[in-house]
Amino acid sequence: MHQESKTIVIQEAGKVGKGRPRLTAARIVPIALFIGIILSLGLTVDNFFTVNNGINILMQSAALGFMAIGMTAVLITGGMDLSIPAVMALGGILGSMYMRSGGDPVSGALIMIVVGVAAGAFNGYAVAYLKMIPFVVTLSTQAIAMGACVMITNSQSILGLHESFIDVVMSKVWIVPTPVLALAVAAAIVALLSKKSLFGRWLYAVGINAEAARVSGIPKKKVLMGTYMFAGLFAGLAAIIVTARLMSASPTMGQEGVVLNVMGSAVVGGVSIYGGSGSFVGAVIGAVVITLISNIMNMAHLSYYATLIVKGLVIVVVVAIDSRSKGK
Amino acid sequence: MTAPYLKLTEISKSFPGVKALNAISLEAYSGEVLGLIGANGAGKSTLMNVLGGVVRMDSGSIEIGGKVVDIRDPLDASARGIAFVHQEMALLPTMTIAENMYIASFPLNKVRLIDSGKAVQNCKEALDSLGFSLSPKAKIKELGAGDRQMVEVARALLGDPRILIFDEPTSSLSEKEKNRLFEVIRKLKAEGKTVIYITHFLDEVFTLCDRAAVLRNGEVAGTLRVEDMTYEAVVKLMLGKSELTPERGASGARRSAGAAVLKVSGLCRTGVFKDVSFELRSGEVVGLWGLLGSGRTELVRSVAGLDPVDGGEIAVNSGGALKRIRPREARSWIGLVTENRREDGLLLASSVRANISLASLPDLLSKLWPFIDEKREKTDAAALVKRLDIKISDMEQSVGTLSGGNQQKVILSRWLRKNPPVLILDEPTRGLDVGAKGEIQEMIVKLARDGAAIMVISSEIEEIMSVSDRYLVIDRGRIVAELDSDASKERLLAAALGAGQGAKP
């Protein structure tokens, strides 16, 4: 029964005419995975199909979704940014320390954003102008940011955030938590800009063929620089949500498992690690899928390390499908 | 005279749709250097690939030292004493000279491990015998082009070959390094080896070779002793008798050129091109004529602001007067259609529409929003598709699915959409069928007639003659001649081959 319905989906995808982006296996897998997980959860877990539970999962996906949006932009250029979670943690810690010392919450949030953008500018400059490999640059940035986090905090959590900060960020619009709403709005705006704005069009062009883009007069270096700064901005936005939800900041916010989640969200969402293709909305859906995987494994009382194995395998499988469909 | 050491008889080879070699017969003697000359596509590479065992001939025979041999693969070729010194240097940069020389055949010690002492020793001897004093332990990446070439020669000599084939070995060498290489080749000749020397440069043939064979369209057009050789004679052989009369192609009478749109003065890039000056005027097509490896592509990439320059000035016409610009800014004034459209021209996976608008997205921004005006993008692209008669089924069709000719038209449309004052086309019809070729050539002429300033590079002399109003001839990074539209084929070819600046008239 299940098998049959899947085949139909794929056949129909094949029929989609020229022009429209074809539904490749890489796009179908996350959707199938998503539906599969929801169904199996719904059948095994009591009260799964409740509004509350749905909102809960979305709430847990919000920060991850922001980071996945940033990662997606970088992946589209053909690069990657491993420093996003660490930068998010550093921004969260610095902003929280500012608030703990009596600073106002708006400035605190701004600090988180500025730290993210600054780290992104560092990455972007190294990649675009010094022509360094994104993997090396962002791995180093990640190490620097993590080191700074631990040194600054002595591995302690920063508590005592401004209450109004937590209240505003964790508020609800009707029954929808603000972070979820914010993610939805951000994803919609970014998706629109990616298709219609000058920068968005340049972003994809650089990812599809950087040299052809350069020959056509597209400022490739500026596009790369801007992309990493964009990723930093979204790391900063994620920091606001994470610190408010945890009501504290600590270096563990940026631990290695988070990079896996961010990367996983993007690739499960159909973003190609070879650059040039992928959608931001897909990445956000990917973030929800990854959160669901974590959740279901939690409920099955599997350890954190078991979830790492599963998520690692999911990423490898999706990337393998992507590679095959590209004939690489 | 003694019998030839290498004797090729009636060798033919066809590839689908092309007769690459047509009954080629050629002889080479021990102790001689035989030059092999021919335009691109004349069959030089195919012939050498047959000798090297890379491709099998369809018919014909190869005799070495009086015995008929069958060369099935490259190992066979080296077993028969044939060795190559390639134009592309196939060395591993992070390894040492000794490691590179013995990479395929390291001397082993008793326990079957690499005997590096012996490798270094052997390497030292091999280098010494060439009169070449460098440490075998030096890394390849630390060596200059000339030294690398010597390592290639030394490696080729390892198996003590009797026949050595040099494929354009001097393309990246300085004058001094070139002379040293010639010394080595003369030494090999004195040792009785048979040397086949492939080159574009006639002056090298004059200084080095004993005889030269000229290939044309897969046939031997003629073999000349160097004493009897002149530029005129070689050019005649390269062009063939039927094509001797100068002909004017589609462009017809000379068009009247307008004001200077681009002025390049004293442009230099170390080791690539030197002291290049020229003007482009609106309404004219200038053919940049030079052989492969003459620096023509490198020059236009720098003029178009894609690659750096080390000196010189670029000025463009801005509001009636020539204004000096920084070389990097040239990209906004000059459109370049690159020679390899699939590599650095098209976004293959993207739509026809997106490919056409690619260079002019900032002009397509809506006045109300920071968004691209997709309606205008689409109508503009559709107008160009119609104007250039591009065969597509849908504006959203991906460019990768189009034929070569239509792909090239998409790139042309991209620049027409942006409409820069200067357009440079590098091999605009490469790989296209005859019909598409003609269409593109007509389009180039028409664009100039409408006031564009155009520069065209082509490997095909007929093509460059059919579109150009005048010619700049480039040879080894220098503009060596400026010729009028009435220049004959012979004159053009002789100029590109180095007549007038070579050793012999």
Image: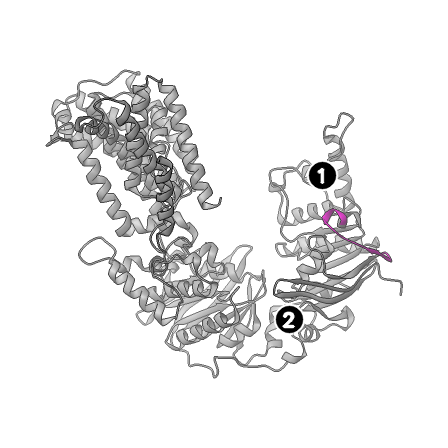
Tell me the subunit letter for badge 1: B
Tell me the subunit letter for badge 2: B
* Among numbered discs 1 and 2, the one appearing first in the sequence: 1
Q: Nearer the viewer, residue B153 or B450?
A: B450
Q: Amino acid at mark 2?
A: Ala
Residue B405 is situated, as x and y percent measured from the top left of the image, at 46, 66
The quarter in which the N terminus of chain B is drawn is bottom right
- The image quadrant of residue B46 is bottom right
Relative to B413, say whether B245 is above or below: below
Quickly name the residue at label 1: B102
Q: Is residue B94 left or right of residue B184?
A: left
Q: What's the magenta region? A: B65-76
Relative to B196, say whether A186 is above or below: above
User: Which residue: 30% across, 57% down?
Assistant: B361
In magenta stretch: residue B66: yes
Q: Is residue B296 visible?
A: yes
| Number of numbered discs | 2
Quickly name the residue at label 2: B499
- The image quadrant of residue B410 is bottom left
Q: Is residue B231 left or right of residue B297?
A: right
Q: Amino acid at mark 1?
A: Tyr
In magenta stretch: residue A318: no
Relative to B127, say whether B68 is above or below: below
